[in-house]
Image (spheres, helix red, strand yellow):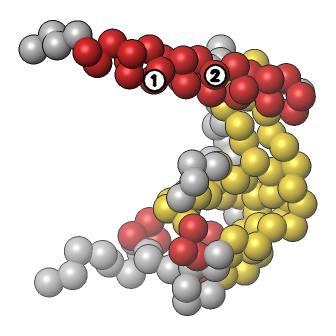
């Protein structure tokens, strides 16, 4: 018994339905890329035109332009279509420059490292 009828385009497993549409691609290293899908192959290698990397730190974000981008399929975790009629981000998000987002990333990384080192120093205290 088949669940998908001939008119069920949303249940397609082929990337062909996404050709020439704006997509978001989540990569294995956590990066998020946006762009128009121009080509793909059987290994999920994809070509994005007008690609940009969306970097989000807290309530700040920046779209860093990359141009034409080829992504190796083994690095792809998720591919999804962007709805052109809806707002991409919540209204509380603020667009900043690439330099500002890099500073915010560095500060976030340093805070995470400090938290990890503090936790390591406190291991001798057995709270269990």
- Write down the residue under mark 2: 110
The spot of residue 110 in percent (x, y) is 63, 22
- The structure residue drawn at horizontal position 33% and vertical position 12%, both measured from the top left corner, is 122
Against 75, residue 123 (above or below) is above
Q: Is residue 128 left or right of residue 18?
A: left
Q: How many marks?
A: 2
**In terms of secondary structure, where does tag 1 sit?**
helix
Find residue 101 and report its image quarter. top right
Whether 74 is drawn above or below 94: the answer is: below
Task: Look at the image and tell me in which quarter the C terminus lies.
Answer: top left
Relative to residue 31, is residue 121 depicted above or below? above
Q: Which residue is drawn at 85% across and 23% down?
A: 100
Secondary structure under tag 2 reads helix
Residue 15 in the image: state x and y as whole percent: 57, 76
When asked about the image quadrant of residue 43, the answer is bottom right
* Mark 1 vs 2: CB contact within 8 A: no
Which numbered circle lies on residue 116? 1
Q: Nearer the viewer, residue 5 or 101?
A: 101
Dot 2: within a 10 Å radius of its alpha carbon, few (fewer than 14), some, or many (20 or more) residues? few
């Amino acid at each position: 018994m088949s669940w998908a009828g001939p008119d069920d385009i949303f249940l397609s497993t082929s990337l062909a339905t996404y050709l020439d549409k704006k997509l978001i691609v989540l990569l294995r290293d956590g990066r998020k890329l946006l762009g128009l899908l121009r080509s793909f192959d059987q290994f999920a290698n994809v070509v994005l035109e007008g690609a940009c990397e969306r970097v989000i730190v807290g309530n700040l974000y920046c779209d860093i332009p990359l141009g034409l981008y080829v992504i190796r399929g083994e690095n792809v975790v998720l591919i999804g279509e962007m709805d052109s009629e809806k707002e991409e981000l919540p209204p509380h998000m603020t667009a900043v420059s690439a330099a500002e987002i890099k500073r915010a990333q560095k500060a976030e990384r340093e805070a995470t490292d400090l938290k990890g080192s503090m936790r390591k120093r406190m291991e001798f205290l057995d709270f269990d």
